[in-house]
Amino acid sequence: MTIVVAGDSFVYGSELSDCTRQSASKKTFFALLANDFDYRCIAVPGLGNDGIARQVVTACETMYDVEAVAVSWTFPGRYEYRFAYDTGERGGNWHTITPWTTIEDVSNLVNTNSDDLKHILSTHSNAVSKAQSTGVADFAEVFYKHVGSTEYWELYSSLKEIVYLQNYLKVKGIPYIFTCADNSVVYNNTVSRNDTVINSLLKQIDFLKWFWFPSGEAEWETKKPRGFYQWALENKYPIGATHPLEDAHKDAAMLMQEKFNELVKKNLQQN
Amino acid sequence: MNWLKRIYNRIKLEITYRKKLKELRKRDPFIYK
């Protein structure tokens, strides 16, 4: 009996004390919640929503004992493609482009108090150099310029992936819980414009299976229900170079416990 | 006048792209690690 947990760097546990390039942290909110069970973390730092859906489907199709799934959706401006060549990254031909794929020098953008700053900067620089040599960076620039940077396309793409995975899990009868890093996947200007296709996708999503972090109350905080990253940032939890650290994950797990019990734990105990 | 229109559209696209990408990076500050 295995719980599969999926998502991006928040679920992998980037910058948490026990996280390495080879193994995910056991201190993330999903790891703390799934601790009583066997769980497999398939999260990949930097992954987009299309990649997250693909990873979960792959896990469910290849592992014989998946009993439940926990997913944290990411920022909608990331896109995964299967390139016509090996990108030199972990996914081989599969690779996620982000708004950072074309930016080599990020030295002024990360928290300078971080101990592993040099490592972060060199890893980023190497990844961008590789993207430039393979052609991925050229593709990313053209794609973002003509398509990917529009709110409509990022939302349309992400919502399709969410509906796809939700329906897959329902068809397979696999209990699941969804949450997200950032609420822009659901709350944004495009949704407010009442577009027919976007509305249709939103109506197909079963939000009873979602956990949202509570809305902010201060004037400068996000007024709508929040994602993990927004909630941690606005509550001023300690942050590493860019990721919330252990305290935020611990409190997030406590907040999510009831919903996790209702959607995942209860179903596992019944089986 | 077509060439002028083409240049105008290219500049407009470039400005919109740079502005939008800046917004996306602000929302998603997660570089490769």
Image (spheres, rainbow, N blue to C red):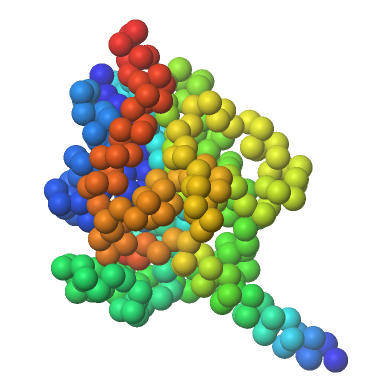
Q: How far across and how far down the image is residue A4, in percent?
A: 31, 31
Which residue occupies the foreground of this view, A238 or A104?
Answer: A238
Q: Can you say which quadrant of the picture contains the C terminus of chain A?
A: top left
Q: Position of residue A233 (x, y in %)?
A: 38, 55
Give the farthest residue toward the front: A218
**Residue A84 appearing in the image:** no
Residue at the farthest top position? A270
Q: Is residue A103 left or right of residue A18?
A: right
Q: Quadrant of the N terminus of chain A?
A: top left
Q: Residue at x 45, y 33 (%)?
A: A211
Is B1 placed left or right of A94 in the picture?
right
Question: What residue lies at 37% left-to-right and 43% top-to-bottom?
Answer: A7
Q: Residue furthest right?
A: B1
Instruction: Please state if B3 lies on the left or on the right of A113 as rendered.
Output: right
**Spot occupied by residue A155 in the image (x, y as percentages of width and height):** 60, 50
Q: Between A209 and A79, which is closer to the camera in this rendering?
A: A209
